[in-house]
Image (cartoon, coloured by chain):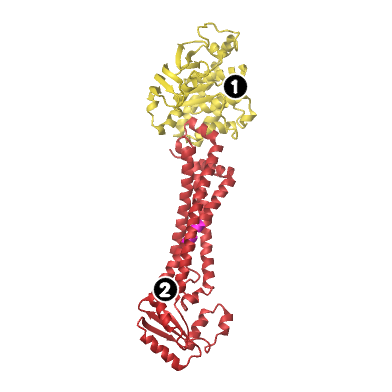
Amino acid sequence: MAIPLDYVARETASNLWRNRVMALAGIAIVAVSLALVGTALVLRQSVARQIVALGDNVNVQIFVQASASGGELSAIRMLIHQTPQIKSCGYLDHQQSYQRMRSLFADEPTVAGVLTPATTPPVFECDLINPNDAPVVKSVFVGVPGVFSVSYPQAAVRSWQRLANIAQTICLVMAIVLLVCSLVLILNAIRMAIFSRRREIGVMKLVGATNWFIRVPFMLEGLVQGLLGSMVAVLFVLLANLGVHSLLGSSGMTSQVQPGSSTLLSPSNLPAGQLFTTEAIILVIGLIVGVAGSSVAVRRFLDV
Amino acid sequence: MIRFEDVTKTYKGSSITALRDVNVDIERGEFVFLVGSSGSGKTTLLKLLLREELADSGSIWVAGRDIGKLSKWRVPELRRNLGCVFQDFRLLPNKTVTENVAFALEVIGRPKNQIRAQVPQVLDLVGLGQKGERFPDELSGGEQQRVAVARAFVNRPLVLLADEPTGNLDPATSIGIMKLLDRINRTGTTVVMATHDVGIVDAMRRRVIELDRGHVVRDQARGVYGYGDDLPSSSRGVPAVAIGSSWSGEDSGEESLSAGRVAAVRARRGAR
């Protein structure tokens, strides 16, 4: 038997309106928990992307003192050739390094303004045979006359990744706790709706309404709560994705990680596909929580 | 129409047998009073008919079907054939009279045009044609019970079950309700009514089934309330003669009822 849509819509809407405070609480908790799920997913994906990008061109950067003499420079060159872990090296002189820095700090005129070709350190960018040897290579070059500093961007990324992992775990644990809470809240909201409608339900049973006819408005009520909550979360993730990335993009993290690369941690990523998947996951979880909460309530408290 | 075969029922957690070896056969179109003191099993019998409860043993037949063997999802189908009226009316206070009656059709998925056609008809039948927009708390007890009867009858059930329908009403109002049930009975609907109302039973002189502690102790055609009391006593309840005379000469009512029924059948055909 078909259940008339207008009947179901009317009943669901009036149930929600009668219990609007409870419903709102349910929706809010669903939204918060799913926002956390979304944050965890976005973190995970963006870190994964960084690792991939990093693996493509691992290098150690050896910054030479701007004032280094030609002798010191060739000694460093010599040392590079003698270091077995280094596969190959590129060299950016004052001018090239300056150009790179300028483009990197184009957004920050105060930094770009103090830079001059003469004060910008030239840099050797080296690919390693094994990226894990970066700390060894660094120890070889630290303290060598004329070397200003040695960095390996991996380190920055690794620590960033650790941080992200912790954040992700915290987000997920909190999300799970909150999802359970939201399930209970929805369950309770439906229970109250059932309770406040017990007269109607009694009459419906008496005149021979089918079980599904009685249940569907309550099930739908849970579904709507889950859906509304997840829609708020979807919106949050959409905005946060833009916000977080533009924040990271201008924080200087970029230069530490990978000078000259605009693909890492820059604003405008995640790509649309991944973002869409994340949002879809959020929506589905929201719907599942809503339906699960109301199903349990209907089964336990609606004795038909 | 209704048959109880050796039906026994004991409620869980109770040592008392609510019904024991009950054998009752009710024909289509009969009007039957169930009498007996409180706890004698009248309500249990009605609950078994509605399949709100299941019998421990024996079988119950309604309209040719063993309802004990009905699967759970077919119970609504059974209940659509049984109209129900209670002592406490069980109307929905936030719905108008019309909405209360329409609700019974709405929730079994009847189409709107059929609801629009049938509801005013049945309200006319119970004499509330002018009060469709009132809310239950704006009506007298008798009028509320009329609404309840309208709701029970609007789907044209085969059987109307009434559990002390006059229990909350004064004698004069009760007469009105009984007239209504009688009218409904005369359309061919079987009526089973549990009652304590001596005056009504004695005046109507219909079949009486008396229960005592779960046993059928009397099954009497054209019976009275009291055991072995053949004479309707005018000292108890409403004077029998008064009711009797008020029931006779109701032909015009019956005519309008059957006209209503024809119209209802037409409406149903039209809906298909």
Q: Secondary structure at mark 1?
A: loop
Q: Secondary structure at mark 2?
A: helix
Chain letter, colour red in render = A
Chain letter, colour yellow in render = B
For the image, the number of numbered tags is 2
User: Observer-nearest residue: B212 or A14?
Assistant: B212
Front disc: 1 or 2? 2
Residue B105: percent from left, percent from top = 50, 33
* Left or right: A190 in relation to B20: right
User: Observer-nearest residue: A295 or B96?
Assistant: A295
Callouts 1 and 2 in the same chain = no
Distance CA(mark 1)–CA(mark 2)? 84 Å
Residue A121: numbered disc = none
Residue B168: numbered disc = 1
The residue that appears at 53% across and 63% down in the rendered structure is A240
Quarter placement of the N terminus of chain A:
top left
The residue that appears at 44% across and 90% down in the rendered structure is A73
| Residue A266 shows in this picture | yes
Position of residue A269 relative to residue B190, above or below, is below
How crowded pointer 1 is (Cα within 10 Å; few <14, some 14-19, many 20+) is rated as: some
Chain letter, disc 2 residue: A
Question: Type of residue at label 1?
Answer: Asn
**Residue marked by disc 2:** A54
User: Observer-nearest residue: A211 or A233?
Assistant: A233
Q: Is residue A258 magenta?
A: no
Position of residue A115 relative to residue A133, above or below, is below
Q: Dots 1 and 2: beta carbons under 8 Å?
A: no
Task: Please state the extent of the stretch shown in magenta in the rendering.
Answer: A34-40
Position of residue B107 relative to residue A64, above or below, is above
Chain letter, disc 1 residue: B
User: Observer-nearest residue: A90 or A144?
Assistant: A144
